[in-house]
Amino acid sequence: MKSRRSKRVGRIPVKPLSPDEAERARCMRAYDALCAADRGCRDCDAPAVKEAWSAVQRALASDAIRPRHVIDVTIPLATSNEANARSDLFRSRHRRARNARDLVPCVLRAKVSVKPPPAPARITLTRVAATQLDPRGVHAALKSVEDAVALDYFGIDDSDPRLLFVCEQTKKKGGPPEVRVRIEWGFGPT
């Protein structure tokens, strides 16, 4: 029986990557390695895994990679700056946080799906109200919503690097206040 030898094909010239394209490619390699490692890795506290997750989180923040799936949900919820609510009793603050923690996962499960999308994900929380808050106040106002999305919907702590939270606000003249939740996942190159 004769053995077949494959013919050697000439090399195809490759155009060098620009710095942006090289960064995107590096982020995608890190993302693919993390997704593979996350499926079977038990030691997610290893320094190499933490460094790779931080690289992916930087890429998510810089829009170097684009999401393949996007969900937009509007939740009718009034939020206020909890850092400035010193005169409120602890019961009223707890009641507002508990209402958000109960309402947000129910709305997400009803409008999106019972099963949350896979991490890593970028979650944009937008406060829509008649008044504007300072940047730190926006984050304080949306903290209970952030906890509800992370813990009660995803089942992951909100400090986990697989979830990147972005807090924004827009001004709206009339109508009830609301919170817009945008979940992006399944990232690929732009």
Image: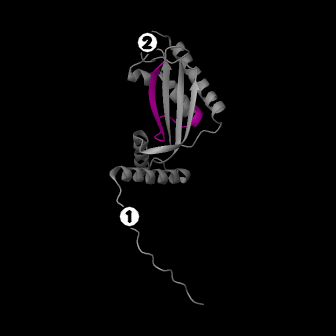
165 or 65: nearer the viewer: 65
Of the two numbered discs 2 and 1 in the rendering, the one whose residue sits closer to the viewer:
1
Cβ atoms under marks 2 and 1 closer than 8 Å: no
Within-10-Å neighbours for mark 1: few <14, some 14–19, many 20+: few
Quadrant of residue 103 within the rendered picture:
top right
| Foreground pick, 68 / 185 | 68
Q: Does the magenta stretch include residue 155?
A: yes
Q: Residue furthest top?
A: 87
Identity of the residue drawn at 58% across and 41% down? 117
Q: Mark number for residue 86? A: 2
Q: Which residue is more in the foreground, 114 or 3?
A: 3
Between the residue at mark 2 and the residue at mark 1, the CA separation in whole angstroms equals 62 Å
Q: Is residue 81 magenta?
A: no
Looking at the rendering, the stretch of residues picked out in magenta corresponds to: 152-171
Task: Give me the residue at 55% from left, 53% from top.
Answer: 40
Residue 23 lies, in percent from the top left, at 37, 50
- Whether 110 is drawn above or below 170: the answer is below
Determine crowd level at label 2: few under 14, some 14-19, many 20+ residues with C-alpha closer than 10 A.
few
- Element type at mark 1: loop
Question: Where does label 1 land, which residue?
Answer: 14
Dot 2 lies on which element?
A: loop
Q: How many numbered tags mark residues here?
A: 2
Residue 52 drawn at (x, y percent)? 42, 49
Residue 136 % position (x, y): 39, 23
Tell me which label, 2 or 1, sits earlier in the chain.
1
Give, as a three-letter code, the residue at label 2: Arg
Under mark 1, the amino acid is Val
Q: Residue at x 49, y 26 (%)?
A: 126
Percent coordinates x, y for residue 82 in the rendering: 46, 18
Q: In this view, does 44 lie above or below 180?
A: below
Q: What's the mark number on residue 77?
A: none
